[in-house]
Amino acid sequence: MIDIYLVTGFLGAGKTTLMKNLMKVFENDKVALIVNEFGQEGVDAAVLEKEGMVIEQIVDGSIFCVCRSDKFIDAILKTSEMGIDCLLVESSGLANPFGMHEVTGMLHKLAPDTFHYSGSICVVDAKHFSKLSDVVPVLIEQVQGADLLLINKTDLSTTEELEKVEKAVRKLNGEVPIIRTSFARIPDDAQIQALRWHRGTMKGFLVKQTPGIEKFVLKFGSVPVEQLIKWLNKWVAKVYRVKGFCSEKNQQFYVQAVHDDVSVSEIDHKRKENFLIVLGPASDKIKKTIQSSWSEHFQTQLILE
């Protein structure tokens, strides 16, 4: 049977980093990936493709929304023909994992004795969880639906912050094993290998829509990376997540930001265009701030879609 592992967590918690680490855990197995992203641009998939793994992308909606669940199930069924041992699924940062219950029920009917749902691994951003959990209900659902929980970014958090977060998630899910991590590195591979069970009593359903978070795309020409970082720092704290690519002098860079944490790293990928995906509260004021600050830093055009 093919073991399915679901990776969940809010925007910027460290899901893609964990996916890369999980590939190393299963390096002796044949692994396929399904990547679910909120937008059509496929940034996470582009990053993971560099690991040389098989990828199926499901974009522009949650795999646990009725609008995308059929495509998700078809993608899973297709992997049964690849001769794989393990399927890693990275859900969108806005996905409610309780829909997996209905998905596994459909898989059992369509392909009996083919797939085994090992469970959900939820990545929690230790630095931002306390602030976001009060305004983004899906964070609560992701923790409640977890079979293994990583409190990530311990290197950016104080002991007091970590204890506060662990206490909060323990109230939401008293049974889940908890591991504190930095860069989503799990210290003992056995903790993943042991995740061969899922609480069968957990019920769930497919949702009709994703909670109200707006997504838009910023497109621009080549600009100095240092200036781009300064520009981002003017407004990123107002949104939940920024990610995309930019280029400078024939070099390509992966750009990402989680609230006020901005990072840029060189990457070799096929896509040469410059764009950033922004996910945050629906607000025309934020868009105006982004556009006005761009004019202050650059002489080139910024296109907002």
Image: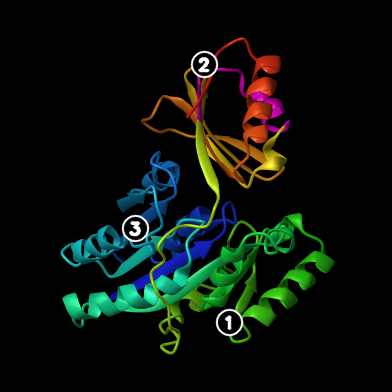
Disc 3, SS: strand
Image side of residue 154 versus residue 110, left or right: right
Q: Which one is nearer the viewer's eye here, 297 or 116?
A: 297
Q: Magenta span covers which residues? A: 218-234
Q: Residues within 10 Å of mark 1 (few under 14, many from 20)?
A: some
Disc 1, SS: loop
Q: Position of residue 187 (x, y in %)?
A: 59, 69
Q: Which one is nearer the viewer's eye here, 268 or 288?
A: 288
Residue 188 located within the stretch drawn in magenta: no
Q: Residues within 10 Å of mark 2 (few under 14, many from 20)?
A: few
Residue at (46, 58) in percent of width and height = 19
Residue at mark 1 to residue at mark 2: CA–CA distance: 48 Å
Badge 2 is on which residue?
249
Residue at mark 2 to residue at mark 3: CA–CA distance: 33 Å
Furthest-top residue in view? 299
Residue 1 makes an appearance in the image: no
Question: Marks 3 and 1: in contact by CB < 8 Å?
Answer: no
Badge 3 is on which residue?
33
Residue 226 located within the stretch drawn in magenta: yes
- Amino acid bearing label 1: Val
Badge 1 is on which residue?
176
**Which disc, if any, is residue 55?**
none
| Residue mark closest to the camera, 2 vs 3 | 3
The correct choice, above or below, for 244 with respect to 55 in the image is: above
Residue at mark 1 to residue at mark 3: CA–CA distance: 24 Å
Image side of residue 158 versus residue 24, left or right: right
Furthest-right residue in view? 160
Q: Residues within 10 Å of mark 3 (few under 14, many from 20)?
A: many
Q: Quadrant of the N terminus?
A: bottom left
